[in-house]
Image (spheres, grey):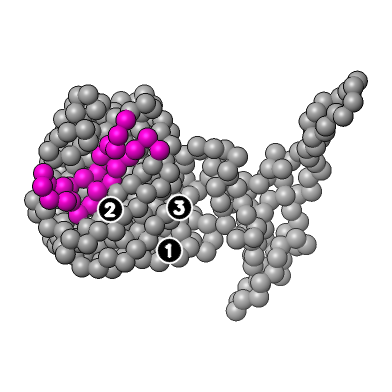
Amino acid sequence: MCDLKRYRSRVCESEPCVGDYVESEDCACVPLNAAVDCPMVSGADSVYGLLGDPCNCQNYYQCEYNTTTEQFIAIQRSCNPCEIWDQEVLTCVRDESKGDCTFFPTTQGIGECPLGEADNPAQFILGNETMDCAPGTTFNLTLCTCIRIVPYVTEMVEIASVMFEDENTITASKGLWLFNQNVELTSDGCMSGKCGFFNSTAESKLELAYFSNALDRFEQFSVRLFFKRSAGVSGERSLVDNSECTIDGSVVGKSSASDALGYFANENGTKVDFTAPAAEDTWNQLVMTYDGEVASFYLNKDLVSQQALGGRLNRVKASMVFGGCTCGGDCYFDGYLDSVCSLGDSALVVVYVH
């Protein structure tokens, strides 16, 4: 097992029973010897490979061959606390034994999306630190994680983010006006730092008027957020919505007691939707992204639906609303939102933000 113990369970078929039903013992751990253990993959100028750490399943080694010294060098790297190394796929994967562990993006960061490193797509910047993605992956701002190759998830740039970092105020990035209706800035119940608490009884919501009558002009669009729905709240509650009272929105995301659901709609009225299990009273990450041809929906980094759509997004005049909807009713979210970010194709973003 990952804790470097060997386990066995026993069944007692007749009394008296002696000893424990479950027993464990420590396993011997032999540290990696780069010269002997590193897998060799011939390349043009070097020999390299990847190998899990035999003494810690959250670590792995990037093995390289130094052609000058003619010796192997094993560089130790780490998965994030929610992941373990998988030698079969040669990357870090979610550790299912840790249940609702939340840690994004892969290798660093809790509840916040760092910046990509412009000079190196295999790195990202978190605070003042430049971090490496796992070998063979690059940082994708749309998904806020390091990925290998994900079809139909193009690299977009930020349009606007909702900031929960100020001392007393919830603001939008880039100086955009943000209307706050009864959303409380809190540090209780958050993944880390601060987040927004939404009270359905108080009809809490955040609105970005910037998006009114604008989404149809974006050929590509993505919205990304973290949410934790309060337990015991009934009905479908809004996470993101730009619907008008009688006109469907172009991007809608919701939360029910057991699922996350939503859709993209184009200018012809065609919809592509998704539904995926999402537990209440725990943090989940939702990413909805559209590249102009295909809509992709991710929940907790897992691709849950991918469908062809085509065309520009539906023209609506409503604001982008988080945690509520334009015309009220029983749509108001109850719980917490964090790290809310919208992205789009760079050419139009530059024009509109300027």
Q: Mark 2, mark 3: which one is toward the viewer? A: 2
Q: Is residue 112 visible?
A: no
The disc placed on residue 302 is 3
Q: Secondary structure at mark 2?
A: strand
Looking at the image, tell me whether mark 3 or mark 1 is earlier in sequence order.
Answer: 1
Give the amino acid type for the residue marked by disc 3 in the picture: Asp
Q: Is residue 85 left or right of residue 30?
A: left
Residue at screen point 25% across, 58% down? 271
Which segment did they paint magenta? 234-258
The dot on residue 263 is 2
Give the label on residue 150, or none. 1
- The x and y percentages for residue 282 are 43, 33
Q: Residue at x 70, y 65 (%)?
A: 39
Measuring 39% from the left and 52% from the top, which residue is drawn there? 298
- Give the percent coordinates (x, y) of residue 217: 14, 62
| Gap between marks 3 and 1 measured at Cα | 11 Å
**Could you say which is closer to the camera, residue 248 or residue 138?**
248
| Residue 92 visible in the shown view | yes
- Which amino acid, mark 1? Val
Left or right relative to 336: residue 66: right
